[in-house]
Image: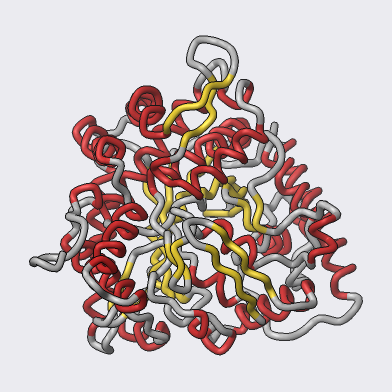
Amino acid sequence: MGEKAAVGRFALADRQRYRRKLQQCLAGLGRLLDEKRFDRPKNLIGLEIELNLAGADGLPRMMNAEVLDRIASQDFQTELGMFNLEVNIVPHRMGDRVLDQLAEELRTGLGYAHRKAHEVGAGIVMIGILPTLAQEDLVSANLSDAERYVMLNEQIVAARGEAFALDIEGVERLTCTSASIAPEAACTSVQLHLQVTPARFADVWNAAQAVAAVQVAVGANAPFLFGKELWRESRPPLFQQATDTRPPELQAQGVRPRTWFGERWVSSAYDLFEENLRYFPALLPICDDTEDPLRVIDEGGVPRLSELALHNGTVYRWNRPVYGVADGIPHLRVENRVLPAGPTVTDVIANAAFYYGLVRALADEPRPVWNRLPFETAAENFDTACRHGIEAELSWPRPGRGGITQAPVVKLVRDELLPLAAAGLDAWNIEPSDRDRYLGVIEERCKRRMNGATWQAETFHRALDAGLERAPALAATTRRYCELMHEGEPVHTWPVGFPGPAG
């Protein structure tokens, strides 16, 4: 959720004071933009991956505190659920062999974490939603033992005023309620950061929004929740419903959800921060009384804009604007939050290569795709891709001609978007052999129509056909997934089913 929350609860006047401080922060951001105080281009990228803990039986383990104690590294942190961890890779400069460098760092870090987790009977699982999670696992008692998560849960529950309703209809339908935001913890993702200049921000964010559907279609890896087979990427509907502060009456009025695709292309980063203040009440009105952002700027300094950063972290855009300060210089980032975790390190880096290359190419185009693709169509594409994964058909501008056409995502990627991504990686000066290797993973997924979600669903049905009941079939699928994940070959090469005659 961004900045750490302070201990304590809130008085009636706190939200008004916080709102005033937010407006000062927004004015400060506007000043910094007008005065061109932001960092020069550095082509910096960052990577975060949310992880699950599971035992040898494939079932979740509520023990992130014990595992983190053994890992003893600041690269690993808690996440919302006690079965979650997060790993953060330090920023890298885009270029040369950075893709292989990221892969090696991830393999080393995750391998170490897995060995440490194994010492206490758990293991690391990179997956969008752990298939063996049960509804009784996702309760407030299993939120991580951190004050900020308790406070966030209390404030979202108070804003909603009633139980959260989960209703997701896909291959099957899931309907249930939750008294807390704990179901959000089921959603484990990869977050890709790209530092950009203010002049480039809008083009990069718009490009990221345009390709979000394609990312999730080829990278889907979350087809199950609470024993039901739902959407191929069930994280987005689950995340929206599990954090929805709106009771049905406010939904009927058209009030925007806090988990949000957005509603328009933008012309600056300021647009998004301003929307976040205008549309979304504060959840954690915690003021930093040590900083007056406008005075700091008047004195030639750089404000932290702590309130703006905290509020921004409680609005869950799939492409989120981020303000940060490093070495006393402010910068802007686009945080891409579309992708599920996993299945393997190679798959994660392939997804990253495809995203960074494609966004670079589309942001550089003289006739931008967002001038030819209605925003509503991009949002519909995202919904379609989440539902159908690699089998989705998306709407996309006709190359070289006017209008929109419908195309299978596998054809769109292979014919048009992979060449664009390759050109984008060339513009980043990525080593050609790494470019071809990782984009080749995306191409093979499309050729074989196989990604993490497809493999999970097909393997699960093999288990059912072999006579297993639903819960044992999901556990067997999870155990086999973990075996193949740790072997490390990309998911399009995984054999469906299980070794031996029963598979």
Residue closer to the observer: 380 or 52: 380
Q: On the picture, is 86 further left or further right than 494?
A: right
The answer to whether residue 295 is seen in the rendering is: no
Q: On the picture, is 156 further left or further right than 327?
A: right
Q: Residue furthest top?
A: 401
Residue 406: image x %, image y %? 51, 26
Q: Using the image, determine if residue 472 lies above or below residue 204.
A: below
Residue closer to the observer: 74 or 174: 174
The colour scheme used here is secondary structure
Q: Using the image, determine if residue 280 lies above or below residue 228.
A: above
Q: Residue at x 29, y 55 (%)?
A: 455
* Numbered circles on residues, count: 0
Q: Residue at x 23, y 87 (%)?
A: 119
Q: Residue furthest left?
A: 500
Q: On the picture, is 377 further left or further right than 82?
A: right
Residue 175: image x %, image y %? 60, 70
The answer to whether residue 79 is seen in the rendering is: yes
Residue 466: image x %, image y %? 21, 69
Residue 195: image x %, image y %? 51, 43
Q: Residue at x 41, y 73 (%)?
A: 85
**In what quadrant of the picture does the C terminus appear?**
bottom left
Q: Quadrant of residue 403?
A: top right
Q: On the picture, is 91 further left or further right than 374?
A: left
Q: Residue at x 53, y 22 (%)?
A: 405
Q: Using the image, determine if residue 291 lies above or below residue 163.
A: above
**In what quadrant of the picture does the N terminus appear?**
bottom right
Q: Quadrant of residue 308?
A: bottom right
